[in-house]
Amino acid sequence: MEYRFSLTPRLIALAIFSGVALLVLLFALGYQIGQSMAERPAPAVVDNAAKRARQQLTGKVNSEAATMAAPVTERVNAAQKAAQ
């Protein structure tokens, strides 16, 4: 049994139409995914930005950061006193 596959104009038009429809649908899907990703930023970024904004507004430094920076500030103060 032999089957001959012939490309008729109707089959070519159907293939072109299907290809274009597939590309349009993929573009629409990518656009919607991009919009949904842009609506909600990563939670860690929002938390860090909110913490930084609160610290800048109040002008206070976290107590943990102050204790971690204490040895460094002591060395700087000692160096400044020695230079004077």
Image (cartoon, rainbow, N blue to C red):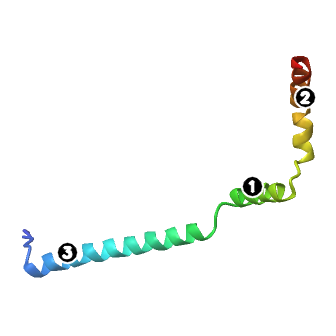
Query: Which quarter of the image is occupied by the N terminus?
Result: bottom left
Q: Secondary structure at mark 1?
A: helix
Residue 72: x, y in percent?
A: 86, 29
Q: Earlier in the sequence, mark 3 or mark 1?
A: 3
The residue sitting at 77% across, 58% down in the picture is: 53
The residue sitting at 87% across, 58% down in the picture is: 58
Q: Secondary structure at mark 2?
A: helix
Residue type (three-letter) at the residue carrying disc 1: Asn
Q: Earlier in the sequence, mark 2 or mark 1?
A: 1
Label 3–label 1 contact, CB within 8 A: no
Placement of 51 over or under 73, stated as above or below:
below
Mark 1 sits on what residue?
A: 48
The residue sitting at 64% across, 63% down in the picture is: 41
Mark 3 sits on what residue?
A: 16
Residue type (three-letter) at the residue carrying disc 2: Pro
Q: CA distance from mark 3 to mark 1?
A: 50 Å
Q: CA distance from mark 3 to mark 2?
A: 71 Å
The residue sitting at 89% across, 48% down in the picture is: 62
Q: Secondary structure at mark 3?
A: helix
Q: Does residue 7 appear to the left or right of 77 in the view shown?
A: left
